[in-house]
Amino acid sequence: MTNQKALIKITQLSKVYQNVNTGSNSKGLSQNPSEDKSSNNGKTQALNNINLTINQGDYLAIQGPSGGGKSTLLSIIGLLDNASSGDYYLSDVCVSKLSATQMAKVRNREIGFIFQDFNLIGDMTVSQNVELPLIYRGVKKAERKAKVAEVLKRVNMSERAEHLPNQLSGGQQQRVAVARALVGKPTLLLADEPTGNLDSTNGDSVMQLLSELNQQGVTICMVTHDSRYAHFAKNTLNLFDGKVVSNVSTNDEQISPKQAIPSAMILGA
C-alpha cells in the first residue's frame, strides 16, 4: 500500500447562507420561512457536514445537480468563500482560521484556477495573460518570461504567445487559462466546469491535457456536469442537497450507480 500525503483534509464542514428577499423583515429574515426552499428561519444550508480528504496527486471530480453544493464546495476549497463551521486543512495548515489577507496569500501561491468562461483579459496577449499571476507575486521580469515560455510550451500554445484571446478558438483559450493556472506551480489545480463552453472536440482536448497534468503529479479538483468527463478523474464525489452521497473510485466496481446516487442526479441535471 502506498503512503499518500493528505493535501486537503476537510472535517464536518458546513455552509449556511442567509436568505435575503423582498418579503423580509428588518433582520433580513423571510417573514414566512416555509417559502424558502431547503431553509430554516430564512437560512439555506448549502453544505452539510462535509468530510473529505484529497491526497497529493489525486484527481477528484465533483458532481451533482444544480444547487447541490458543488460550486460552494469548490469556492471554499479555493479560499474564495468561508465555511460557516468545520475545519479545512491545506498542506497541514488550518486555512479556515486564517485572516482574509493570509488567505489571499495562500490562494495566490498554492492554488491555480480554471474557469468555465476562461476569464482572459481581452486586450492582453496570451503571454501577458499567463504572466499576470507572477506579476502579483512580484516575480522579476526575466524569471517571469522564462516561466511563461515554459508553461506555454507545456500546453502546446507557444506559437500563439502574441495572439489576443479573440484570435483563438475556445479550446485554445482554455489551454491559455490552464497555462495561467499552472505558471506559479500551484499545489492544487481547481477547475470549475472547464469544458462547459466548449464543443466536444475541444472539450476532449482540454480533458486530455488535464489527465496528462495529473499523470505528471498535479493534484486536480474539478466540478463537472458531464459524466463522461468525470471518468477522467480517479475519484468522483457526488453531492445532493449539500450532502456527500458517495465518494467512489472510478476503478471501484463494487458500488453500482443505482446504489451510489439517485438516478435524477447522475448527469448533474
Image: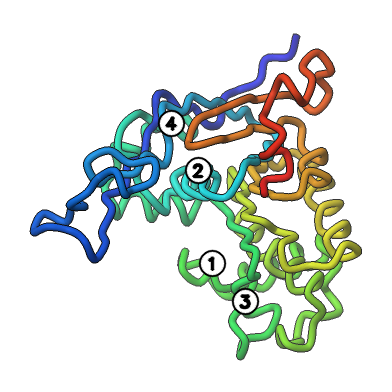
Q: How crowded is mark 2: few (under 14 residues within 10 Å), some or many (20 or more)?
A: many
Work out how far the residue at label 2 is from the one at label 3, CA to CA, in angstroms: 26 Å
**First along the sequence among labels 1 and 4:** 4
Residue appearing at x 81%, y 70% in the figure: 171
Position of 12 with respect to 113 (left or right) is left
Q: Check the image and name the residue furthest to the top.
A: 1
State how far apart marks 1 and 4 are (Cα). 24 Å
Instruction: Find the distance from the CA under tag 4 to the CA under tag 3.
Output: 30 Å
From this view, report whether residue 25 is shown above or below residue 220: below
Q: Which class describes the residues within 10 Å of circle 4: few (<14), some (14-19), or many (20+)?
A: some
Q: How crowded is mark 1: few (under 14 residues within 10 Å), some or many (20 or more)?
A: many
Residue that carries the numbered disc 1 in the rendered image: 133
**Residue at horizontal 61 percent and vertical 70 percent from the top:** 144
Element under disc 3: loop
Instruction: Please give the residue where the numbered disc 3 appears in the rendered image.
Output: 120
> Secondary structure under badge 1?
helix
Give the answer, above or below, for where 184 lies relative to 239.
Answer: below
Q: Name the residue under label 4.
A: 89
**Considering the numbered disc 4 on the image, is that residue within a helix, a strand or a loop?**
strand
Q: Where is residue 239 in the image (x, y as percent from the top left)?
A: 57, 35
Question: Residue drawn at (36%, 29%), measured in percent from left and top?
Answer: 87
Q: Distance between the residues labelled 1 and 3?
A: 12 Å
Identify residue type, mark 2.
Gly
What's the residue type where badge 1 is placed?
A: Pro
- Say whether marks 1 and 3 touch (CB < 8 Å): no
Mark with earlier residue (2, 1): 2
Vertical order, 188 against 28 (above or below): above
The circle drawn on residue 69 is 2
Extreme residue in the right direction? 201
